[in-house]
Image (cartoon, rainbow, N blue to C red):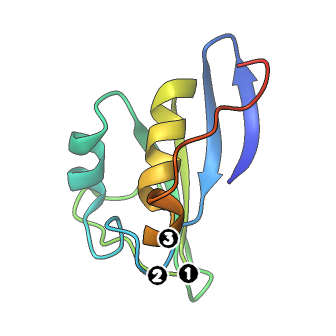
Amino acid sequence: MLLILVIGTVGYEEVYPCEDSPSVGSTIKQVEEKFPGVKMLAFKKKDGALVPNPNPETIIEKAGRLTVFGTIEQLEALERYCESSEVRAKPAKRAEGR
């Protein structure tokens, strides 16, 4: 995760779906429905092609990058969802000061 900007309780960040993440193979629409309030602003494909304002039917690829907007809590939940199964199995640690 690379946090780009936080203003109050909302922000946007880049999320990198891991190979074994349940997000890989899902559509943008499916992920946005799973995390109501999160908006996918852009998707960078593994071949480097940038897709601004991706179509809801865009398939999330491994080695891709999502630029997403939402509340801090929504972004943390989405980031955890995009992590590897090994990381997801560990208890979540909240960042200090949040």
Residue tagged 3: 86
Displayed quadrant of residue 7: top right
Cα–Cα gap, marks 3 and 2? 11 Å
Residue tagged 2: 19
Amino acid on which disc 2 is placed: Glu
**Residue 10 placed where, x, y %?**
59, 20
In the picture, measured across the screen, residue 6 lies left or right of residue 83, that is: right
Q: Secondary structure at mark 3?
A: helix
Asked if 55 appears above or below 41 in the picture, the reply is below
Q: Secondary structure at mark 2?
A: loop
Residue tagged 1: 63
Q: Nearer the viewer, mark 3 or mark 2?
A: 3
Quarter in which the C terminus is drawn: top right
Displayed quadrant of residue 46: bottom right
Considering depth in this image, is 15 or 91 the residue closer to the camera? 91
Cα–Cα gap, marks 1 and 2? 7 Å
Q: Residue furthest top?
A: 8
